[in-house]
Structures are given as structure tokens and as C-alpha cells.
Amino acid sequence: MRRINSLYGRIGMLRRVPEESTKKSHTLLASLSFSTEGSYGGDGELQQNSSKVKIFDRDLKRIHRDRAAWLSRQKNDSFVDAVAENLLDRLEDCKKSFPTAFCLGGSLGAVKRLLRGRGGIEKLIMMDTSYDMIKSCRDAQEDSLDNSIETSYFVGDEEFLPVKESSVDLIISSLGLHWTNDLPGSMIQCKLALKPDGLFLAAILGGETLKELRIACTLAHMEREGGISPRLSPLAQVRDAGNLLTRAGFSLPGVDVDEYVVKYKSAMDLIEHLRAMGETNALLERNKILNRETALATAAIYDSMFATEDGTIPATFQVIYMTGWREHSSHPQAKRRGSATVSFTDLQKQFGGQS
């Protein structure tokens, strides 16, 4: 677990804490869409598709990203930076280099700023659904003194990647893929875009994220409106992440979880941080009007149930990290089923009597 001990707008120090302890922290957080070449359309043609099941309003999410680009301009977010840093740490465990990297959605700016030569990246391609977010990242690069990596930017959609098959060595997505309507399909496209022995790194928000706010919203809606309305989006559970990697066809899949607890002065500060991250509600079936009395009741319930002794309120963010490789002959392979030469019965006879 991790703690970020600060309030929104004031960045504090970050450190690891034991898994059983809680984390305390600071503030949080469409364009044309094409399928990967040759992956869904056949005949290698880029085709515009739509997900079978639509949960999120992708146009609204693009607007949220546009707003976030301006709210977060010239600011570094300690939570977003911590997630990106932890994700990029995995590159230091790899002996190989990744000349061409593709970064999609989420915290693009943090990833670009924190790469610091890791992974041996020579060319970096950055994509987002929001033109304003892309412009913000490009402007930040122009102000930076470090221009050692050749970087290109374009607007695109994570659901329909405009990338050729087997064209990149590394794909990075930090806090972006959990807003896709077809997460398995997006991950399949990512795998197809990778060259053999290419690496996929992703961080998404998990199902325990904002559990305090979910409880407060539910109680406030029941008290003031006599029922509940979806205010927070459904998120993947930890047990789903491994299945997603396997379903997408990644080799050597790996999943681990981290939690961050961010402290805010009030529930309103939490909402402002979510807006700055582009993480506000984008459900298609959302109630577009939030009653003022319900909003005030939510803030009051949140404060009464979860406020700490120092007067701040905590918000939990669960982050699921996923790692997968595109298959390659150098990867360890499982033995064929039934190829074992020793039975468990023989092992029991040989070692069963030993304590």
C-alpha cells in the first residue's frame, strides 16, 4: 500500500507501507475511432466499429478529458505521478530495450515526464481522445529541457487503435483503459499492435476505488430521493484482470494491486480533484441532474462517517497493474498435457511419509 500525506494542491512525500495498512494521500483524479489494422476488419483495412455493449458515453468522456487538460495545466498530481512511477518501474526489471513505445490515454504527461530514459525508448507515440490533452502534453514538452526522445502526438480512441499490427515494441496505458466500453477488445488490439516479444503495461482503477464516496452517495440518495441512482462507474475487480490478459492472448501475464488513500479537506475538494483527473461520471444511463439537497447530504454523510481526527476525509483508490507480453519463441512454454513421466502416486509413495 501507499500513502500520500497531503491535501489537494499541496504535494507530499510518497512511501510504501505494509500491505495490511491503509494509504493516505492527496488529490485525485474522442475523436475518430478505428480498429487495429487487420485485427477486426479483415483484409488489413481500417474500419470504424462500435462496441456491442455500451456502458460509457465516450463523447462525454472526451469532454471530461478536455476540461482536465486545462484544470491540470502546469500542475503535477502526486497520485497520478505515483501510479505512473510504479508502472514504469517495471521497465527497470526488463533486460531488453523497447525502441518504439506507444502511450495511450490516461496520464500521458506523467508518463512522458517520468520515463527518464527507462526502457531504452527512442521513439514515443502519444495518443488521447482529447485534442486539448494532446496539446497540453505537446506544450509541456516544448517547455522541457529534455527532448532526447523523438515524440509524436495524435488524437485517437483506445477502443479502435489506429496502429498497424506488429508495429510497436511497448504499449503503456496509465489510468486510461478503465473507461473503454470494450476492455477485452482494446487489450486484444494492444496485443496485435505489439511486435513479437513486445510488452504491454497498464494501470487501471479497480472496484474498491472511491468506496467511501459510493457508500455516502447511496445513503444520501435513499434518504433524499427514496432510491439510488448510478453516480460512479463500474470498475474491474482484481480477479478479472488475469482473465482479461489471458483472454487477450498475452504471454506471461502478471497482475498486482496497490491502494492509495488520499486526504481532502472536504468532499467538494475530492470532486474537484476527480474533475482535474478527468475521472467524473460518464455512464450512459446516468441521471444527468444531481439534486442540490442530495449533493449536500452526500457531503455531510461522507464527513460524518469517514472524517479523520485532523478534520480531513479519506478517499481510497485501488490501482490494478497488468503486465503481458506478445508471444515469442524465447518465452517459457508449458509442457503438453499428459507429457509427465512421473505420477503423483509415485511422488506420494516417495515423499508422503516425510514430515
Image (cartoon, grey):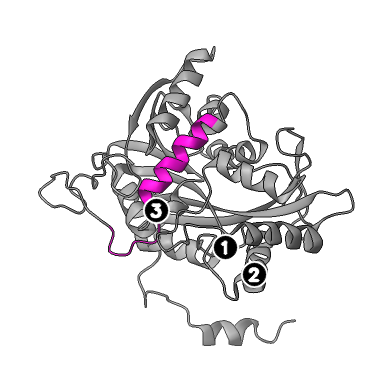
Give the magenta range.
51-70
Q: Position of residue 106 (x, y in %)?
A: 48, 41
Q: Which residue is mark 2?
A: 224
Front one among 176 and 85 = 176
Residue at 37% of width from left, 44% of height from top?
197
Per the model, the C-alpha gap separating discs 1 and 2 is 26 Å
Q: Earlier in the sequence, mark 2 or mark 3?
A: 3
- Foreground mark, 2 or 3? 2
Q: Provide the residue designation for mark 3.
A: 180
Residue found farthest to the right: 309
> For this rendering, which residue is in front, 320 or 160?
160
**Element type at marker 2?**
helix
Kindly identify the residue that appears in the image at 69 percent across and 57 percent down. 296
Which amino acid type corresponds to the residue marked 1 in the rendered image?
A: Gly
Q: Which residue in the protein does label 1 denote?
A: 207
Amino acid type, mark 2: Arg
Q: Main secondary structure of the magenta part?
A: helix
